[in-house]
Amino acid sequence: MSEIFDMIDVKIIEKLADIVNDRELSEITVTNGNKTVTVKGRKPLPLPPPPAMMPAPMPAGVPAPPQTSAPAEKPEASGGNIVKSPIVGTYYQSPAPDKPPFVKVGDKVKKGDVIMIIESMKLMNEIQSDFDGVVDRLLVSDGQAVEYDQPIMIIR
């Protein structure tokens, strides 16, 4: 073994090892005349493949009650103002299940009155009326999922 070190300068091997480590190489081979030196570095563990993007699961919840007061056709404002959902979420007509609804058909509302709650991302968002008037129609059922800009009620 000592004759190998006599033939090859140990300082060269140390420099090659430093190069392999500093540059994170797997190996380096140097040949000079009849002398060849190969220095192998530590092999880094292969990175796992990135996880496949899966669509987010829909939250398990209470199924929406059958739509009894929500017509399938598009609502016609016909002189009224359509109140639309400002966010995607779940429509609630009262602050709690045992509390009365914020508004019912025939109720008078003023601009700024809270008229519903839209739950989105576990936050209860109180939605205020942008109009003065009387609630003419409710277009969605309590607990129903609503989309952004979906008509919810008509105020005349």
Image (cartoon, rainbow, N blue to C red):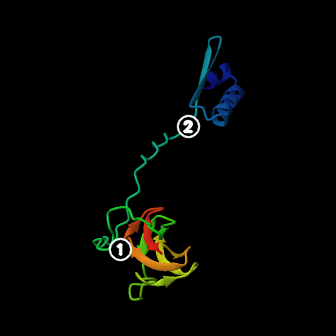
Between discs 1 and 2, the one toward the N terminus: 2
Dot 2 amino acid type: Arg
**Splitting the image into 4 quarters, where does residue 29 fall?**
top right
Task: Please provide percent x and percent y for residue 76.
Answer: 41, 65
Q: Is residue 97 left or right of residue 18?
A: left
**Label disc, if present, on residue 1 of the rendered structure:** none
Q: Is residue 2 left or right of residue 78?
A: right
Identify the residue at image location x=32%, y=67%.
71
Dot 1 amino acid type: Ser
Identify the residue at image location x=58%, y=79%.
112
Judging by the rendered image, the residue that carries numbered circle 2 is: 42
**Splitting the image into 4 quarters, where does residue 36 fall?**
top right
Judging by the rendered image, the residue that carries numbered circle 1 is: 141
Name the mark nearer the viewer: 1 or 2. Answer: 1
The answer to whether the residues at label 1 and label 2 have Cβ atoms under 8 Å apart is: no
Task: Answer yes or no: is residue 23 visible.
Answer: yes
